[in-house]
């Protein structure tokens, strides 16, 4: 198992930046994939960005070129740098850890609110 705690959310004006952090309760170096998802009011949760244990990244089209996912294995922490934020980025952002290959288990943090004002 792994517990995840997000931080770094807040209120920012359009065009601004935020950096989200996700601290894990155990080593993340062997976790298959770490990622960020978001859920806006009335919408389904969607993938924002993921990073494999090998360092491969994947982004939803709407954030490409603006968001960057990274991980610091020494600190057991995953980050999401968000630049040029837009009002449509407003959502609760959740950290995810996918553990295992054959029958992967998903672990989630409690979420952190990001609000972008126009």
Image: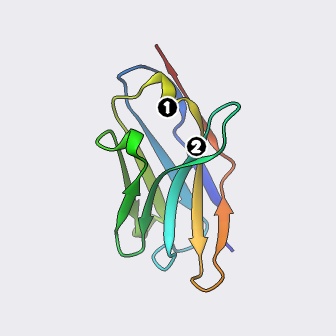
Q: Residues under labels 1 and 2: Cα distance?
A: 9 Å
The residue indicated by pointer 2 is 38
Determine which quarter of the picture holds residue 53: bottom left
Which residue shows up at 57% across the image and 47% down it? 46
Vertical placement of 93 versus 102: above or below? above
Q: Which mark is residue 46?
A: none
Q: Residue furthest top?
A: 118
Q: Does residue 35 appear left or right of residue 51 in this picture?
A: right
Residue sitting at x 69%, y 74%: 1
Residue 42 in sight in this render: yes
Q: Which residue is at the far left?
A: 65
The residue that mark 1 highlights is 89
Task: Residue at 66% x, 67% y: name it.
Answer: 106
Nearer to the camera, 54 or 3: 54
User: In the image, residue 94 lies at what x, y percent?
Assistant: 60, 48
Residue 90 position within the rendered picture, expressed as x and y whole percent measured from the top left: 55, 29
Q: Eyeballing the image, is 94 above or below 113?
A: below
Pointer 1 local density, CA inside 10 Å: few below 14, some 14–19, many at least 20:
many
Image side of residue 104 versus residue 78, left or right = right
Badge 2 element: strand
> Callout 2: 10 Å neighbours few (<14), some, many (20+)?
many
Point out residue 114 in the picture as x, y percentages from the top left corner: 55, 32
First in residue order: circle 1 vs circle 2 = 2
Which SS class for mark 1? Answer: helix
Q: Quadrant of residue 73?
A: bottom left
Find out whether the residues at labels 1 and 2 contact each other: C-beta distance under 8 Å: yes
């Amino acid at each position: 198992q792994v517990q995840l705690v997000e931080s770094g959310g807040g209120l920012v004006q359009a065009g601004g930046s935020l950096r989200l952090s996700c601290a894990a309760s155990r080593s993340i170096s062997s976790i298959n994939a770490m990622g960020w998802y978001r859920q806006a009011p009335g919408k389904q949760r969607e993938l924002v960005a993921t990073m494999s244990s090998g360092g491969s990244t994947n982004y939803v089209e709407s954030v490409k070129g603006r968001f960057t996912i990274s991980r610091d294995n020494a600190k057991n922490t995953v980050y999401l740098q968000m630049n040029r934020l837009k009002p449509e980025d407003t959502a609760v952002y959740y950290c995810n850890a996918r553990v295992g290959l054959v029958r992967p288990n998903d672990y989630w943090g409690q979420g952190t609110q990001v609000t972008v004002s126009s």
